[in-house]
Amino acid sequence: MKYLKRAIREDIENYLKYFPVLLISGARQVGKSTLALHLGIDNYITLDDINMYQMAKNDPKGFIEHLEKPVIIDEVQRLPQLMITIKEYVDKDRINGEFILTGSASLSGFKDISDSLAGRIGIVELYPLSLKEKYGKEGNIIDIFAEDLDSFLLQKYDNSSIVQNIIEGGYPEILKIDNTKAKYLWFSSYIRTYIESDAKELANIRNMDKFMNMYRLCMLRSGNIFNQNELQKECGLDNKTFSSYFSVLEHTYQLQKLQPFFKNELKRLVKSPKIFAIDTGVLCHLLRIASKEEYETSHYKGDILETFVYAELLKANTYANNRTALSYYRTSDKKEIDFILEFSNGIVAIEVKASKSVSKSDFKHMYHLAKEIPDTFSKGIVLYNGESFLKIDKDMYAVPFGFLI
């Protein structure tokens, strides 16, 4: 399988021009090392190598000084205190692009260290492959949704591959496997080996079985309001332990909270976040969905589809020219819009529908929001399973899922 170009590559090359340290952060097996090794830098070490790890731990200053630079240091989260040594080194003689670090945990997992590198480090977050990356397509859906959409009207798009992409998810290794049993084994190994390994490094987890049970229960809530009290009781964990475990899942890029949309003039908005799995392949594995038939008949189908769209928006936002604040909208009387994109020139509302047709009634909550905030509402979009890009009304569009490719 050929190397798939990552859309964030251009941003990375810019960071190398202006920062002495670059961190590529993301989940295990998401392609961080592969991306780093395609930057044309010959010197590479990994802290997964026990010899390198011991050398760096025992004499961090000597280790950093004697490395041939520029250098890639892989799995830096295994020794976060090395960041302090790197800071001291670059402060003596700042040369941009000297250190390319990769880590399987977000830098917010060790905030004090990340703060000390402020102004010296560029950070990019790498997520599983987006649809556009899988198919080698240009463009960014966040940027496209921010602009005028009339040029796409009546164009047709193929949705036939969407369900398979949902079931497979975006981890690059899965694309190399064409056997259902082998995919099952890969996901099982990924969850047990990688998540367990990272969890042990980031937190003092005394009962791994309870942690894994909590992980599964949280994943199965993907696309729903985050109710910590309810989840705590179901997991049998106290408040402090649950919060600690959940932060590990966030820092290892397994789950994310999506905050609710907020405007002072809108008084009756729900204030609790929703939670989303980052990868629908992992989610489908946990739900034992391995075929289109199992997906179509699943009780979780709507949540999975919403999770899939969330992941595509999240990935696109990492390299968009028009970065957006991503949120969801829900009022206390249950008016709901799946996603809100806030741009400097207005708000784009997105609703996700599994149906093959769209009517004006599918936009009813968007019409409500447009009346509430007429000066900032830009357009409403219903993503659906039909083939035609349609304009339903002024600033209201029906967009096929295939448009995301």
Image (cartoon, rainbow, N blue to C red):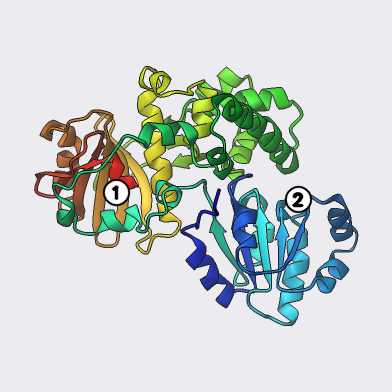
290 with respect to 152 (left or right): right
152 with respect to 288 (left or right): left
Q: Residue at x 30, y 42 (%)?
A: 402
Mark 1 sits on what residue?
263
User: Where's residue 309, x and y in %?
Assistant: 37, 40
> Hey, which residue is sitting farthest bottom in the picture?
93
Q: Circle 2 sits in a helix, a strand or a loop, which is it?
A: helix
Disc 1 marks a residue whose amino acid type is Lys
Q: Callout 1: few (<14), some (14-19), or many (20+) C-alpha neighbours within 10 Å?
A: few
Q: Callout 2: few (<14), some (14-19), or many (20+) C-alpha neighbours within 10 Å?
A: some
Mark 2 sits on what residue?
78
User: Where's residue 277, x and y in %?
Assistant: 49, 35
361 with respect to 101 (left or right): left
Looking at the image, is mark 1 or mark 2 earlier in the sequence? 2
In front of the other: 386 or 381: 386
In front of the other: 97 or 202: 97
Determine whether 64 is above or below 242 in the image: below
In front of the other: 49 or 378: 49
Q: Residue at x 70, y 34 (%)?
A: 193
